[in-house]
Amino acid sequence: QVQLVESGGGLVQAGGSLRLSCAASGGTLGSYAMGWFRQAPGKEREFVAGIGWIGGTTKYADSVKGRFTVSRDNAKNTVSLQMDSLKPEDTAVYYCARSSGASGVVTGPGGYAYWGQGTQVTVSS
């Protein structure tokens, strides 16, 4: 059973940066697309960024494009999300997820089989 654990969340002022990490155990991240999602109170979970298994293909939500960067290290079984120029509207619980089987990036949460427990990101104005 694959287990994903996120870390790196916290409280930051608007304009600041955070780096989220996702570590996997009980299975490999290699050969699978990985995604980052977020969910704010009262809102649905939304796609933030994703990366294909080879690492060269990435996709971002329009709201974070140019500010967030997703990367992966298959040898270390980790995925990261560098978040710069943070805005108050980025406040949410952030989740990493491993796809059900796709090697390319998918943006719908239904395409992911394994999820972490989430890490809180709060951006103050």
Image (spheres, helix red, strand yellow):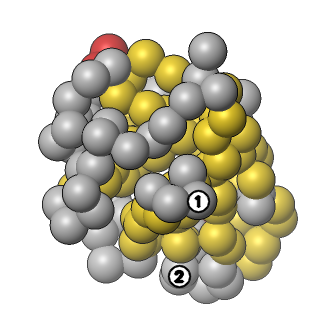
User: Residue at 59% of width from left, 23% of height from top?
Assistant: 2
The CA span between labels 2 and 1 is 27 Å
Quarter holding the C terminus?
bottom right
Residue 15, position as x, y percentages in the image: 61, 84
Q: For this view, does 111 lie left or right of residue 75?
A: left
- Indicate the position of residue 24 as horizontal and vertical percent values: 63, 40
> Quadrant of the rendered structure where residue 39 is?
top right
When the figure is inspected, residue 30 is found, relative to residue 25, above or below; the finding is below
Q: Choose top left, top right, bottom left or bottom right for residue 40.
A: top right
Amino acid carrying label 1: it is: Lys
Task: Give whichever of 32, 123 is nearer the camera.
Answer: 32
Q: Relative to 67, does residue 27 appear above or below in the rendering?
A: above
Q: In front of the other: label 2 or label 1?
A: 1
Residue nearest the observer in this picture, 92 or 77: 77
> In the figure, 41 relative to 48: above or below?
above
Q: Amino acid at mark 2?
A: Ser
Picture disc at residue 85: 2
What is the number of the mark on residue 3?
A: none
Q: Quadrant of the N terminus?
A: top right
Give left or right: position of 69 versus 12. left
Residue at disc 1, secondary structure: loop
Q: Which residue lies at the image location 77% right of the left edge and 72% below the top edge?
A: 12
State which tag comes first along the sequence, 2 or 1.
1
